Amino acid sequence: MQATVRDDVSDLIAAMVKQVDTANGELDARATYRKAFLRLRAHLSLHPRSVSRPSLLFESAAQPARLLAAQCLPLATAVVMHLYPLCALQCVPIPLLSPARLKRALLLRDVHQRSLILANVGGERTQTVDSPLIATATADGIRIDGTCDYMSLASVADVVLCRAELADGRGTVLCAVDLRRDSVRIGPWKFGGSMRLSDTSSVQLVNHHVTRGRYLVVRDRADMQCISAYQRCWFHLFLADIHLARMERLRRDWQLPPASDSIVALNEVGHLRQYSLRLLDDFAPGADIAPLTRCTATLKLRTSLLAQTMMATLRGSKPLNIGEKERLESAAQELGYIRFQPTSDQKILQSLDSTAQNREQRADGARAWTQGMWFDQRSLR
């Protein structure tokens, strides 16, 4: 999975980073970001089309993400926020006769024909905002109001995929929101330093109209949870790939010898990745998504632990000058954000521990039942 950055892309990334860093204030920096991103995307394949298997689509989509991550992890993270919902949208299993298939086909046709850049909001962090997205039915569609705290690619995205709760409490709406409207308000950048390249801001929708063809009402909460989990699995896969690509580049640039435990962990990550892609291919409508969710979450967690080890290694290095020290610290800080995306490490650990405890309880129950049967049989003799 080693990523080799082409010279043309490498030069564009370096120029983009320098121009954003030297911009005069955030407005100028964002304008610079938009122009530089437009130049860069012409050299990248950011609209992979659905192929025979989801795993093949992932491998195609992950290639440009890894290429970016090798040189600039925050920028790669931003691009992943476009790639993972696009891939999930193309591959999520939908029953043959469902009206959702037509709506998806029309949206994907628009995205591919116009080379639209997608963004995505949702997840754990957006559940704490004061004004969540609310959908109200209108004569010709729905009206969306509310705020989401985190949206990457805020300066360049054309469409954001989001969900909103129906005002009458009767379900959830999945919608594709046009960001080039006066009813959309993008906040200032959430992060400073190198993380500005993730282009992350809040987004507020005020009386924003969405036409009927651009949203889907999901009445069943279990169905909504399954859709969200499926999308998150794609995010976990992409996150693992870009962080592994970045760590490989850092090892090479700073000549860091891999520790024996890291070699073992990388081997485990490779097997988890392979198995996750197999489960992704096998997932079908009505199937239990829990095995896929657990596997991709474990992959993300294992990669995060590797990133934390790399952070400690970078901070323990002996830089030759102040410039090198700042670069090492910046690289270390960038690796730290994976702990909170999109499912926090702590939550994954709690889930894995709960699953293990449940398995142990079931095993104890089976042993008790077997022993009880043995005693019953003895009493019958």
Image (cartoon, helix red, strand yellow):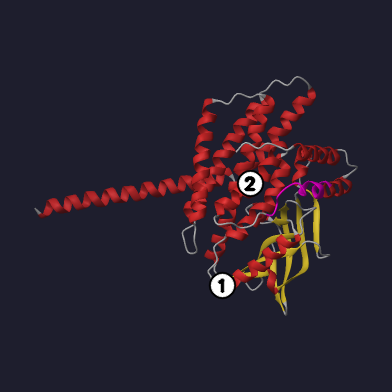
> What residue is shown with label 2?
62
Q: Position of residue 128 (x, y in %)?
A: 66, 55
Q: Residues within 10 Å of mark 1 (few under 14, many from 20)?
A: few
Residue assigned mark 1 = 98
Rendered-image quadrant of the N terminus: top right
Quarter of the image where one finds residue 24: top right
The answer to whether 1 is drawn above or below residue 276 in the figure is above
Q: Is residue 356 magenta?
A: no
Which callout, 2 or 1, points to the residue nearer the camera?
Answer: 2
Asked whether the beta carbons under mark 2 and mark 1 sit within 8 Å of each other, the answer is: no
Residue numbers of the magenta segment: 36-47
Closest to the observer, 303 or 115: 115
| In the image: residue 344, left or right of residue 143 | left
Residue 315, relative to residue 358: is it above or below? above
Amino acid carrying mark 1 in the image: Ser
The reply, left or right, for residue 237 in relation to residue 361 is: right
Q: Amino acid at mark 2?
A: Ala
Q: Is residue 140 visible?
A: yes
Between 44 and 344, the residue placed more toward the observer is 44
Above or below residue 184? Residue 167 is below
* N-term mark: 2 or 1: 2
Residue drawn at the location 72% of the way across and 54% of the way down? 149
Which corner quadrant of the image does residue 312 belong to? top right
Q: Look at the image and say whether residue 39 sits in the magenta stretch.
A: yes
Q: Residue 73, position in %: x, y?
A: 70, 40
In this picture, residue 294 sits left or right of residue 117: left
